[in-house]
């Protein structure tokens, strides 16, 4: 199966993949507000609550409906963290700690 091997500081945080069809998404974001936000982020010591990493997706392999999944979410990133993503082939993804029950939605029919 196609997977995203996601690592933070060389430690795997997720091996995200879906069985047959769906979506795998990785979002790395920073939200800076106010004057001097970027400079403040660079000067901050320790975790920066404005930095976020989220690995999630939609598994639409089940004919009963799609399942949304979250493999990893972090709000404790800091300056100097190394985030790596490799596109790999794997037999299975890491266990998904949060998954919604199958559901029918217009988005699923677009898959």
Image (cartoon, rainbow, N blue to C red):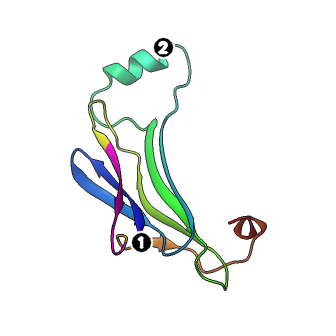
Q: Considering the numbered disc 2 on the image, is that residue within a helix, a strand or a loop?
A: loop
Which residue is disc 1 drawn over? 97
Closer to us: 1 or 79: 1
Where are the magenta residues, as a range? 84-92
Asked whether the beta carbons under mark 2 and mark 1 sit within 8 Å of each other, the answer is: no
Quarter placement of the C terminus: bottom right
Secondary structure character of the magenta stretch overall: strand
Q: Kindly report the distance in space between the C-alpha atoms of the residues bearing marks 2 and 1.
A: 37 Å
Residue density around tag 2, few if under 14, some if 14–19, many if 20 or more, within 10 Å: few
- Left or right: where 13 falls relative to 64: left
Find residue 40 and report its horizontal and vertical position in percent.
40, 19
- Left or right: where 12 falls relative to 66: left
Which residue is disc 2 drawn over? 36
Find residue 27 and report its horizontal and vertical position in percent.
49, 45
Closer to us: 3 or 105: 3
Circle on res. 53: none
Find residue 51 and report its horizontal and vertical position in percent.
43, 37
Residue density around tag 1, few if under 14, some if 14–19, many if 20 or more, within 10 Å: few
What residue is rendered at 29% in x and 50% in y? 7
Is 110 placed above or below 99 here? above
Q: Which residue is the extreme one toward the left?
A: 10
Tell me how many marks there are.
2
What residue is rendered at 54% in x and 62% in y? 57
- Left or right: where 23 falls relative to 64: left
The first of marks 2 and 1 along the sequence is 2
Is 98 placed above or below 49 here? below
């Amino acid at each position: 199966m196609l997977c995203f091997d996601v690592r933070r500081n060389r430690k795997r945080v997720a091996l995200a993949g879906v069985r047959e069809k769906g979506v795998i998404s990785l979002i790395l974001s920073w939200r800076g507000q106010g004057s001097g936000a970027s400079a403040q982020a660079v000067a901050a010591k320790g975790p920066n609550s404005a930095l976020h990493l989220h690995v999630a997706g939609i598994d639409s392999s089940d004919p009963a409906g799609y399942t949304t999944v979250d493999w990893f979410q972090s709000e404790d990133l800091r300056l100097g963290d190394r985030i790596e993503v490799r596109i790999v082939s794997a037999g299975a993804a890491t266990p998904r700690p949060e998954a919604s029950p199958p559901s029918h939605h217009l988005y699923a029919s677009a898959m």
